Amino acid sequence: MKKQHTKLNTLSRRTFLAAGGAALSTLALPNLACAQTPARNPLNILIITADDLGTNLGCYGDPLARTPNLDALAARGVQFQNGYITAPSCSPSRSSILTGLYPHQNGHWGLSHLGYRMRDGIPTLPGLLKGAGYHNAILGKLHVAPESAFPFDFAQTDARKTWDVKWVAQTAREQMQAAQAQGKPFFLYVNYFDPHTPFHDQFQGVPANPQTPAQMRPFPFHPVEELNAGVREQMAGYYNGIARLDNGIGLLMAELKAAGRDGDTLVLFVGDHGAPFPRGKNAVYEAGVKVPFLALWPRATTAHRDNRLVSTIDFVPTVLDAAGVKAPSNLPGASLRPLMSGRETPWRQTLGTENNAHGPRDWYPQRTLRDGRWKLIHTLLPSVPNPKITPSGGQPWINLTKSPPPGSLGEQVFQTHRNAPQWQLYDLQNDPHEFHNLAGQPQHAAVENRLRAALLEWRTQTKDPLLDPQQLVALTRMHDQSDKSFGDGARTQAGQKAPADGAEKRKKQDEKQE
């Protein structure tokens, strides 16, 4: 097993060295992070992530969501309507939050506990802030490797411990006090496991009034009318996890205010990718890569909703701007500070996302590019069925619905998800959930060609190794030949060996759901 990990990481590093390393510049966007005047007084930093959370909040219009605290945070700050992660899988997505680079730049193709890791020597947010005198603390899972690249002064990375939202708030308070005792600003990286599986309708009595399966309705991105009982139960667990998360956000923000730090702390909140349901998590459709994205910059924020295209590649330059630290010159993102006021300012007109792998058996490279209206999806291995989709159209760990009738829109959509064509083109203005593929239609040829050219430019500027057919073949072959039990016996996110007996079995089951 260890040999398999070594093979995977060695080839991954070799791939990136051959491609020339990290990106040179941002696509059609000046490096605003470096252009800003450094902050006179460095702000404290609070980054909050929610595991598997799509745009299922009240402030984003979800009628099933019970999220008064997150809605209040959105009302106080900037609610980005078009906020994206870089990849719809946990470790690759989180690697971008902490490095400011796309996964194809930093090398984190898939999940860390299944052997994937970044290239060596990449600057990370904790390392840059530690060098600037910050007290760094992480609560909840890191899930990015190698852990040695992230110098936290305090690290409690047991993901499940964050189900106890009171513990999270208490520990955050202790870390704020620890920073104050040292006369340092703090960087708190708080990662809630909710609403990730395994779902809990309640944990230690939270939420007080759980929602029931009978209240559930299909997600808008699922063109079905009827859900089976199992899916209703799963969805209720998902929404109850969101309610518990929201309770935790309320407690955490109360601690920030009680410490007197709400006036000098940059707050960034994001989901790490979409909901763990078909066409969400592990998919490059909007439900997989578009997430809740909230920001609050003291004294710079005018509360508003913002429609510009933003991404977690913007987190590192934003945080370094707030800390008064010069950003690395090769970052593809930019500081969000110019957007905080809501005024018009030069900003990107297109944005890319990607998918590569979840685990070694899930290699399915895709690239996307969207502008203000249109979205293009490029599947690099169109002859290969999507390995994360079962023949019935559901995810391996969840059946979505009773089989859609033959010839129905539902059947068409799920078959496209499972057997993706090389190109997909969607009009997000008229088809926000990407049900009708317009690629190849003569009346949309000009739009498709324009986006193809922009996609190639983005991949070229960010030095995507998979532009090289030999690299694509090599990585595909490596994944095809990987041990089918690859990842069993992996260490937990806290860096400890997995528990034995029944707990070990449950852990393996849960890891399959990552």
Image (spheres, rainbow, N blue to C red):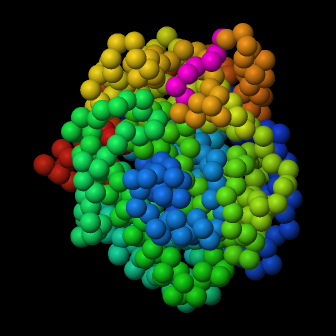
Q: Nearer the viewer, residue 291 or 6?
A: 291
* Residue 83: percent from left, percent from top: 62, 49
Is 172 displayed left or right of 493 in the figure?
right
In the rendered view, would you say 38 is above or below 419? below
Residue 350 seen in the figure:
yes
* Residue 281: percent from left, percent from top: 44, 39
In the rendered view, would you say 514 is above or below 131? above
* Residue 99: percent from left, percent from top: 63, 52
Is 366 displayed left or right of 412 in the figure?
right
Q: Quadrant of the N terminus?
A: top left
Principal secondary structure, stretch drawn in magenta: loop
Q: Quadrant of the C terminus?
A: top left
Q: In percent of the image, x 54 and y 84: which residue is there? A: 257
Q: Nearer the viewer, residue 481 or 90?
A: 90
* Residue 66: percent from left, percent from top: 40, 61
Figure label count = 0
Q: In percent of the image, x 79 and y 58: which residue is there? A: 33
Is 66 displayed left or right of 198 in the figure?
right
Q: In percent of the image, x 64 and y 47: which residue is there? A: 82
What is the span of residues highlighted in magenta in the rendered image?
434-440
Is 449 displayed left or right of 88 in the figure?
right
The answer to whether residue 488 is magenta is: no
Residue 480 seen in the figure:
no
Q: In percent of the image, x 29 and y 22: which residue is there? A: 403
Q: Nearer the viewer, residue 132 or 236?
A: 236
The answer to whether residue 439 is magenta is: yes
User: Which residue appears farthest toward the left when viewing the image?
Assistant: 501
* Quarter occupied by residue 440: top right
